Image (cartoon, rainbow, N blue to C red):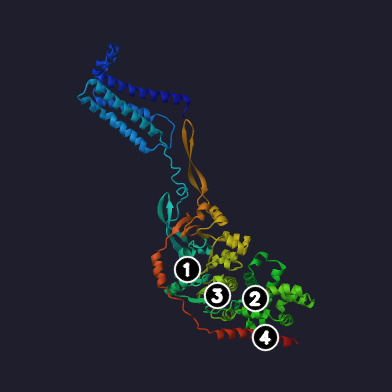
Amino acid sequence: MQTGENEQALRKIIDFTRLLSIAILLIHFYLCCYPAFQQLKLTHQIIDYILLPLSKMAVFKTVLVAKLSALLLLIVSLVGSKGKRDEKIRPKTIVTYCFTGLLLYFISSLFLALPYSVIIIMVLYMATTAFGYLLFMTGGGLLFRMLKLKLGGDIFNRENETFPQEERLLVNEYSINLPAKYQLKGKERNSWINIINPFRGTLVGGSPGAGKSYFVIRHIITQHIRKGFSMLIYDFKYDDLSRIAYNALLEHGGRSFYVINFENIMHRSNPLEPDTMLDITDAIESARTIMLGLNREWIKKQGDFFVESPINFVTALIWFLRKYEGGKYCTLPHVIELSLVEYKDLFAVLSTEPEIEVLINPFISAWRNEAYEQLEGQIASAKISLARLSSPQLYYVLSGNDFSLDINNPDDPKVVCLANNPQKSQVYGAVLSLYVNRVNKLVNRKNQQKCSLIFDEFPTLYFNGIDNLIATARSNKVAVTLAVQDYSQLKKDYGREQAEVIMNIVGNIVCGQVTGDTAKQLSERFGKINQQKESVSINSSDTSISRSTQLDYAVPASKIAGLSSGEFVGMVADDPANKIELKTFHCTIQNDNAAILLEEQQYRLIPAVRNISQSEIQKNYQRIKENIKQLVEVLTDSNS
């Protein structure tokens, strides 16, 4: 415990030690240069009586011992000295002072052997020795006042924000394992991102160019295909992901490969396959998906009269076609054509099906009461939206049935790719949303094969019930991977509430460079770690340093906003059988770029499945129109 009295006592001891050092040096000068002092008549009988006997002491027997004794006492006094610490003092200055001082201090002994008069020798010896002594004392004082700070050594606080990460490779029959490197206290270490439970949902985030597809999604595709998963891939920029899946499947086999592509037609599939439409709720969900997919702004207005009315109208059309002759015309193209029939004939036809009476009653009532403006407001929205899908190529793909959408059927597992085009994403995205909706219904069942659903640029789809799928499909071995750019994009397309649910319900997050609210949310999710803080207080008489530890964010939002391509932060989920203590990571995923480039150069192109002519597509288009025309004629004739 330091008190004023203790400090005063210490100061007196230090001063006494230094005075003793100076006294030994002065006595040494007097004894060593005594002949010179005699010539200058600077001696005195009393002084001689006191000092000359001291020459017999061991300290003064030789020049070297006397000098070393004085120097040792000086060093002791310097060790205990307390001066104002200064961070501007440089080691180079200290070394220069001390080395020069010691050199002069000891080399001055050579002057004693010079063939000059004793007075000249005295002056040279004493001046050089004293000057060396003063230089060393100055250097020593600077040494013990030097303040070595690391405050400016890590200006971005990088070392403080490092933390231990999982370095074990944890593999199971479902896992996704990504090799990585991370920094820990200035050292680079190897680590693994182990997504051992992909069934708890995986969110892959990052702005364009962050490396979502190259560093993460391609490995999810290849590893899951290698482990026998059936798969649905939403390929926003076809054929980036489809090509990876196709070539992985060529190597590992065991599943059929299908592509839904509206531009370069390959396979055909009917998302409204009557065998999968078990009751009217399936029709309601399909109608909601297609209408909200075509009108994304309606997502935030669900429940409004002029939003629900078109959905009910399309539901009635779908369920009518499902019930008519066992569903022979239950396809989306037939639904579109049926919606274009004149109201008189349309309502006459729909009235023949009692199960949709409740749905069409408001429309028939408005028509009979001649409330045409209201009727147009209710139905025109559906007609205008569906009219965007009136394309011969869309009709051709949607009216065929090359494969069923139960992709995880153990008897016929499949890898299905849904191809989109960024330039036509709104129209194609709405139809592909319908495929996703139907696949969702069919895969989330018990006793099916393990299945992986991968959605690149997820917000370009409308997936009604994605939160319910992630929450309930875990027990049915359905792994969902969503790739998004950031939270704001998800919020714009799905609304705030749904976006928050999606962000919070997933168990695994792998995120590249993002900014704004997304970075803040992730930073809070990753939590805080103990970080060392150092502060310096400098005043006129003293300098004090204080060090402390405090909790601060492990990965601040600003760091997430500045991640490089290939650098990811995130958190993984574990399971009861395989606990992971270190779930959070901030690392750079290691891709073997040369091997991937070589692999891609050897990729085989996805082969063309059919060589279809435009005339065949047009014939199919006209056939669908004719089917609806005949249906209306038959039913209106029977009613009359």
Q: CA distance from mark 4 to mark 3?
A: 32 Å
Label 3 vs label 2, nearer the camera: 2
Ranked by sequence position, the earlier of labels 3 and 2 is 2
Which of the 4 image quarters holds residue 476? bottom right
Mark 4 falls on what kind of element?
helix
Label 3 vs label 1, nearer the camera: 1
Per the image, the residue denoted by label 2 is 386
Residue 440 horizontal/vertical position (percent)? 57, 70
Ranked by sequence position, the earlier of labels 3 and 1 is 1
The quadrant of the picture occupied by the C terminus is: bottom right
Ranked by sequence position, the earlier of labels 4 and 3 is 3
Type of amino acid under label 1: Ile
* Residue 474 visible, this angle: yes
Per the image, the residue denoted by label 1 is 221
Mark 2 falls on what kind of element?
helix
Q: In the picture provided, is 12 more to the left or to the right than 613?
A: left
Type of amino acid under label 3: Asp
Relative to residue 598, is residue 496 depicted above or below? above
Residue 394 horizontal/vertical position (percent)? 58, 78
Q: Callout 3: few (<14), some (14-19), or many (20+) C-alpha neighbours within 10 Å? A: many
Per the image, the residue denoted by label 3 is 406
Q: Callout 4: few (<14), some (14-19), or many (20+) C-alpha neighbours within 10 Å? A: some
* Residue 314 visible, this angle: no
Tag of residue 201: none
Relative to residue 637, is residue 211 depicted above or below? above
Mark 1 falls on what kind of element?
helix
Do the CB atoms of the residues marked 4 and 3 lie less than 8 Å apart?
A: no
Tag of residue 629: 4
Q: Residue furthest top?
A: 45
Q: Callout 1: few (<14), some (14-19), or many (20+) C-alpha neighbours within 10 Å? A: many
Type of amino acid under label 4: Lys
Q: CA distance from mark 3 to mark 2?
A: 26 Å
